[in-house]
Amino acid sequence: MIKTDVVIIGAGPVGLFAVHQLGIIGLKAEVIDNLDKIGGQCIELYPDKPIYDIPALPECTGESLTKNLLEQIKPFKTNFHLNQRVESISKEDNHWKITTNKKNVFLSPNVIIAAGVGSFEPRKLQIKDAEKFENNGIYYSIKEKNFFKNKKISIFGGGDSALDWAIELSKFADVTLVHRRNEFRGAPHSSETARNLQKKGKVKIKTPYQISSIEGKDKIEAIKIKSEDGKEESIPTDCILGFFGLIMKLGPILDWGLNLDKKTIPVNTDTFQTNKEGIFAIGDICSYPGKLKLILSGFHEGALAARACFKLARPNEKYRFEFTTTSKSMQERIGVKKSD
Ligand SMILES: Cc1cc2nc3c(=O)[nH]c(=O)nc-3n(C[C@H](O)[C@H](O)[C@H](O)COP(=O)(O)OP(=O)(O)OC[C@H]3O[C@@H](n4cnc5c(N)ncnc54)[C@H](O)[C@@H]3O)c2cc1C
């Protein structure tokens, strides 16, 4: 069991800046995210796209913003618990007990929900036996590429992930790339590389085809694919990789007894507290009159929620407003070196 001042659900830009706002007032946070990486939508959906409306940063990308936010919270040595989804939150005396799907348990007087549009989950194959073979022949992400060495792999999808992995895995595996349209949606350069590999016999490309069945009892032996005009083909296959994009699900958040308004959590704008004492919501997931789903709004929301967390984490201390420019204690927490 991990005890802390604040548990933050969501390592998107807003959750990351909340770590900073908590850190400078002396509160420790543990951050949990369902993804295998830090950065939320900025990293998962648009790492290379330019952002032009972060205050005092005329231009940055989703990736560089995340990198800078991580740099800014470095002094607080925050623990990130990735690849796990918060499943339940329940009250235990004066604390909240937060449990993840990996059965990790956290105890904290405060929870900040910075869960954006919910957890990102891969869109899955909708055919017979797809569930049975999931993680045992069917995969929707790659953790260790060497696992696929010398295997017969059928990759599905027409976007960047499908193309990039087809190109990468073709270096040491037998790859067939299957897409339901003739044109790929991914970067033109990647599409061209895949077509060139096809010409050299290093990748097989099947378009416009869709999977129609999986063959094999305990493990996958082959798949059948079908074209629009009904032509069917069998492809010997050890592993299927599906890259059909992500869906966002509020998921377990719906069951935590919080007031909800459509897919958002209404908050009081003095503190960003929800209808439950000690549970706050900031960033894209919260709603209030005038809410703007922008990163800069989430930063402000995190600053206010952090101050409200102080009251429950340090009930016997008085919170004092200070500036980072002049506060010695804040500067010590940030690790500013004293000059004589
Ligand atoms: C293409 C695109 C362009 C954009 N451009 C701009 C722009 O120019 N300027 C701007 O200000 N904004 C822009 N936005 C919006 C901006 O990205 C969001 O406002 C911002 O990401 C919200 O941050 P967040 O931290 O609230 O949530 P998110 O970034 O969505 O992060 C939430 C995190 O919570 C995790 N999570 C959810 N539920 C759970 C759970 N139960 N357990 C564990 N983890 C969970 C998710 O995995 C996710 O990583 C853009 C968005 C898109 C899609």
Image (cartoon, helix red, strand yellow):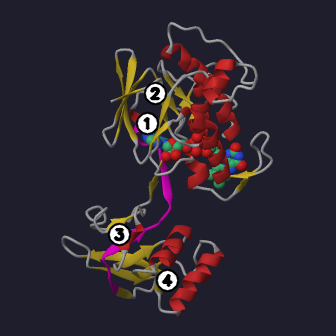
Find residue 207 and name its label: 4
Q: Which kind of residue does numbered mark 3 sit on?
A: Phe
* Magenta stretch, residue numbers: 234-252
Asked whether mark 1 lies closer than 8 Å to ligand 1, one says yes
| 237 part of magenta stretch | yes
**How far across and down, in percent of the image, does residue 237 sit?**
32, 79
Which numbered disc flags the more N-terminal residue, 1 or 3?
3
- 190 lies above or below 54: below
Residue 28 relative to residue 326: left or right: left
Residue 39 relative to residue 215: left or right: right
Dot 3 corresponds to which residue? 147
**How far across and down, in percent of the image, does residue 213 sit?**
31, 75
Dots 1, 2 in contact, CB < 8 A? yes
Dot 2 corresponds to which residue? 258
At label 1, counting other C-alpha atoms closer than 10 Å, the crowd grade (few under 14, some 14-19, many 20 or more) is: many
Question: Where, by quadrant of the figure, is residue 140 drawn?
Answer: bottom left
Q: Which residue is drawn at 46% across and 43% down?
A: 33
Asked whether mark 3 lies closer than 8 Å to ligand 1, one says no
